[in-house]
Image: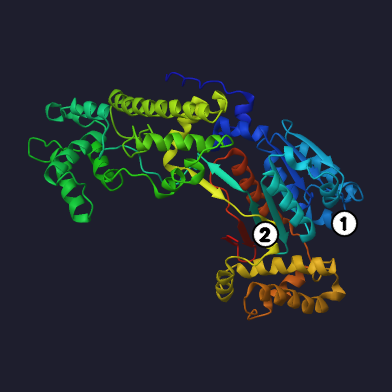
Amino acid sequence: MASPAPKSPEQSEKSKKYDRQLRLWGDHGQSELEQAHVCLINATGTGTEILKSLVLPGIGAFTIVDGKKISEEDIGSNFFLDADSCGRSRAEVATQLLLELNSDVKGDYVDELPHQLLENNPDFFINHSLVIATALPQRVLIPLSQNLWKLGVPLIVAQSYGFIGSIRVQVDEHTIVETHPDNQNPDLRLDRPFTSLKEHMNSIDMSKMELKDHAHVPFVVPLYKALLEWKCNHGNLLPTNYKEKEAFKSIIRKGIKVDEHGNPESEENFEEALRAVNYVVVPTTIPSSVKEILNDNSCINLTSKSKPFWITAKAVKDFVDNEGNGLLPLRGSLPDMTAETSRYITLQQVYHNEAARNAEVVFRRTQQLLHQLNQPDDTISEADVKKFCKHASSLAVIRGSCIANEYESKPNNAADIALCLEDPDSMMIHYVMLRAVDRFFAEYNTYPGEFDDQVEPDIVKMKSCISKLLNEWGCGPLAKDDFVHEICRYGGAELHSVSAFIGGCAAQEAIKLITKQYKPLNNTLLYDAIASNTETFVF
C-alpha cells in the first residue's frame, strides 16, 4: 500500500482566508492593505461595489461620507440596499452591510454632504491613504481635487453613467518597486560574468562527464561554454542576427554527446540551451525607463525631505557608477531548468551570493546617504534594499496631473482630442459626453434627460454644452448627434452591471496604489458597456 503523502505546513487562519491574494502581492502587500484607511465619498451603486472589492481582501478601515437618504432609485441600482432601507441614511446602511462581508475590517460613516464636509473640515482627509469619489458634481469635484492634491492624498474618481463608465486617477507622484512585469528575461550576466560565476563555470569540465551527468548539468553551463568559444572567434562580440545565432547554436550542438552509431543523444538541458539563445545571449544593459529614474532630478539632488525610494535609487546609481561597472545590482534568481538538484542549487547559490554582496554595497551606501540627509538610520531597512535591488530592472515612477487643472484650463493635448474625435473607433467621444454632462449639471442642476418630459429640450441644451466645450478646446463640431441623443436617453441612470465592472476595476487600481505594487492606471479609463471595450487616455 502506498504511504500517505506528507502533510503541508499548517497555514494560519488568516493565510487560508487570503491565500489567493497573498500569491499576488505577498505578506508585505497584505500588510500595506491592512494598514490602509480608505474614504468613499457617496455610497452609490458604483461606490459600494468599489468598497466591496476592498473589504473582501481585508482593507484596514473605511469611512463613507454621504449626506443623502436612500431613494427608490438607489434601491434599483445598488445591490447593498433594499426596500426596507428607503428613507434611511445611505452612509449608515451601506457601512453596516459592507462590514458584514469581513470581520477583519473596521468601518465608519459621516452623514454629511461632501461639499459641507469640505467647507467645514478641509483637513478631514489628511489621515486617509486614499479617497474614492463617485457621482460628484463639478462644483464639488474641483475643490476636492485641489484639496487632496495639496495634501498629497491620492484620489480615484469613478463614474457609471448609463452604458458608459469612467475611472480617473489623481496622484502627484507614485513610485513602484514591484511592478510585476509580464515578461522579464532572466538576469544571468553570461556576456559579462562576475568573478564567482567565472570560477564556477571554469570548474566544470563537461568533456569528461558520463552521459547521465552530462545531461543533468544546468543549461546555463553549456550556453556559457559555447559563448566563450564564440566571443573568442568574433572579437568578443555577441551573436546578433539570425545567421549568427544559427552559427552559435551549432557550437552548442557540438557539445551534445553521441551514441556508438554517431547519433546525438537526447539531452534536454542542451535543448533548453538552444531555446534560450534568443533571450539569454543578449547584452546586459539597464532599461531606458530605469536610466530615466536614475538620472531624474529627484534621484540626483537629494534633500532632507527625499523619500526612501529616491534615496535607495541614488544608492543604486552610485553602485552602477562604481562597483557595478555600469550594471544594476544582480537580481540573484534563476529560471527553472532541467538539472540535477545539487548542481542547480550550487549554481543558484553562486547567483544568490553575488546578489547579496551587491545589495550589501547598496545598503551601506543608503546608510551613508541617510546620515548625510539627517534622516534616521532605520528609515530604510536592509530588507527594503534587497527588495529594491532584486526589482531594480523594472522600477517605475508615475507622475500624474490634478483633475481640477483638467477642468479649469484647455487640455495640453487638444489637437490629439480633435484627431480622436474623427476616429470612429476611438472612445474619446465618451469623454466629451461625460464632460458635457458635468457642464450641463453645473448649469441646470439636473442631468440631461432626467425627466421624461424634458428629453427633447435637454438634447438642444446638451448640444449647446458640447459646442461650448469643444470651442474652448479648439476642436471642431461633432460630425453626428447620435451620441447626444443616447446620453440624454440615459437620464443620469446608474446601471448595476456597469457599476459592478467599474467598481471592480477601480478597486484594483486602489489596491495598486495602496500596496505600491503593479503599475496603476495613469490618468483616465473609459468603458463602453455596449461594445464591451475599454480605452485609456492621458489628459
The image's colouring method is rainbow
Residue 418: image location, x then y, percent: 58, 73
Do the residues under discs 1 and 2 have CB atoms within 8 angstroms?
no
Residue that appears at 23% across and 33% down = 221
Placement of 32 over or under 397, stated as above or below:
above
Asked if one can make out residue 477 in the rendered structure from this viewpoint, the answer is yes
Residue that appears at 42% across and 35% down = 316
Looking at marks 1 and 2 on the same chain, the residue that comes earlier in the sequence is marked by 1
Res. 72 mark: 1
Is 506 on the left or on the right of 388, as rendered? right
Is 374 on the left or on the right of 442, as rendered? left
Is 235 on the left or on the right of 380, as rendered? left
Q: Quadrant of the N terminus?
A: top left
Res. 405 mark: 2
Q: Amino acid at mark 1?
A: Glu
Q: Amino acid at mark 2?
A: Asn
Residue 461: image location, x then y, percent: 79, 76
Q: CA distance from mark 1 to mark 2?
A: 36 Å
